[in-house]
Amino acid sequence: MSGYSIRPITLKDVDEVWNIEKMCFPVPWSRQSFVLEIEHNKCARYFVAEHAGTIVGYGGMWLVLDEAHITNIAVHPLARRKGIGEALLRVLMAEANRLGIQKITLEVRDSNTAARNLYEKLGFVSVGRRKRYYSDNNEDAIIMWNLNIGKVLEAKQGD
Ligand SMILES: CC(C)(COP(=O)(O)OP(=O)(O)OC[C@H]1O[C@@H](n2cnc3c(N)ncnc32)[C@H](O)[C@@H]1OP(=O)(O)O)[C@@H](O)C(=O)NCCC(=O)NCCS
């Protein structure tokens, strides 16, 4: 999708972000969780992708000491497979890198092939498993890490 831009989230975006959250996850965060992240969590960084005045995706992370932890990343079902998820993840990684952080991690459902492919494309490697991590279906979480954010950002897309 061309013509979208990525920018830091604001409180005005919360309703649209929460709508996407509810469409994308079986156990969505509450609306209030997003408000708290934006207003009170100094470790949190969230970005939205906007197309023609509409939010089409978002992603966030916590920055703790020398590590970044992706909390969520989601793209509206009608806007998928157009590079927006990858662009959001690259922005999160660039923000961490800008702040001197090289290590980034996340958990992903074992069965979530789309997300796992996205993370692998940007240099994340599976390093472990949290058994029965997701309460809705007792699915395992795969723990993924990328220990060299800068290297991924330096590589040209498609390398
Ligand atoms: C995962 C998600 C964010 C990807 O967003 P997207 O904008 O559709 O992804 P992109 O178009 O940027 O694709 C980037 C890469 O991801 C992988 N990918 C994305 N969708 C895929 C799919 N349906 N099947 C296989 N691989 C897929 C591919 O490697 C792709 O690279 P390619 O285009 O060179 O093949 C999106 O599917 C989503 O919102 N899913 C629901 C929420 C979710 O599961 N979030 C992750 C929680 S850990």
Image: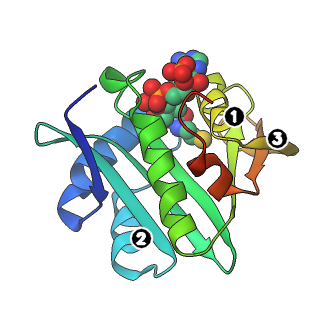
Question: Residue, x 76% and y 46% (percent of image)?
Answer: 144
In the image, what residue type sits under mark 1?
A: Glu
Q: Which residue is mark 1?
A: 120
Image-quadrant location for residue 63: bottom right
Question: Could one spot residue 78 in this view of the protein?
Answer: yes
Q: Nearer the viewer, mark 2 or mark 3?
A: 3
How much space separates mark 1 and mark 3, taking CA atoms?
8 Å
- Residue located beneath label 3 in the image: 126
| Closest to the observer, 155 or 131 | 155
x and y, in percent, of residue 15 in the image: 23, 52
Residue 66's disc is: none
Q: Helix, strand or loop at disc 1? A: helix
Q: CA distance from mark 2 to mark 1?
A: 27 Å
Horizontal arrangement in the rendering, residue 97 relative to residue 15 (left or right): right
154 on left or right of 4: right
Q: Is residue 62 above or below residue 59?
A: below
| Residue that numbered label 2 is attached to | 37
- Crowd band around label 1 with a 10 angstrom C-alpha radius: few (<14), some (14–19), many (20+): some
